[in-house]
Image (cartoon, helix red, strand yellow):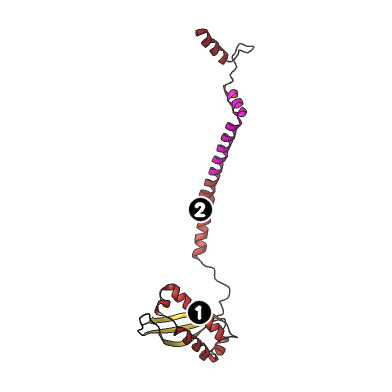
Amino acid sequence: MAKEDKQAVDEDEPEAGEDGEKKTETGQGFVKKLLGNRKLLMIAGGGALVLLLLIGAGLYFFVFSGSDHAADATTAAIPEMPATPPQVAFYDVPDLIVNIQTSDGTSAYLKLSLSLELYSGDEKAGLQVLMPRIVDQFQGYLRELRVDDLKGSAGIMRLKEELLRRTNVAAAPYRVRDVLLKEMIVQ
């Protein structure tokens, strides 16, 4: 048994060269073993690739992105002003007071103060002539509303959209850009 162990140890030792020195194949043996085993080579290569990608992503986010966010923050803080001011005009609608429906049958009143945003000041004269038609459209719509229809910001947005639609229908050749609420009281 001792002879077998000695032979096994002798087989593991590198052979002696011409000069009597032993060849060291520890480094070369590992490389040959690595190149010979394809699964091990793919795992080692994949790990190295993932490591390089993580290092690259880290450098990108920490080095390059930091300066972009600082530049974006300063740009967002100072809005760019247009060269010419927008050509808009505002027309105040007379105050509207209407009774609206409630779920329990009691009376409730809605007071609205509106302003119409126009594309130019030239449209004011034409809109003034058509104002009785616009107010009639508003009255018909507002009297059909319920108190629940006006609750919350979604209710107010629906009210504004519907008033804008009805205004543009009533003032047919003229276009109104937006309906602005100055005052809205439900009592």
Q: Residues within 10 Å of mark 1 (few under 14, many from 20)?
A: some
Please tell me how crowded label 2 is: few (under 14), some (14-19), or many (20+) other residues with Cα within 10 Å: few
Residue holding disc 2:
66
Comes first in the chain, label 1 or label 2 = 2
* Nearer-the-camera pick, 85 or 15: 15
- In the rendered image, the vertical position of residue 107 relative to residue 83, given as above or below: below
Q: Which residues are magenta?
A: 29-55
Label tally: 2
Residue closest to the eye, 19 or 50: 50
Residue at disc 2, secondary structure: helix
Q: Is residue 41 magenta?
A: yes
Q: In the depicted view, which residue is nearer to us: 129 or 158?
A: 158
Q: Which residue is mark 1?
A: 162
Please identify the dominant SS of the magenta region.
helix
Instruction: Using the numbered discs, state the Cα–Cα distance from disc 1 to disc 2 in whole angstroms.
Output: 46 Å
Q: Residue at x 51, y 63 (%)?
A: 76
Report whether 95 appears left or right of 171.
left
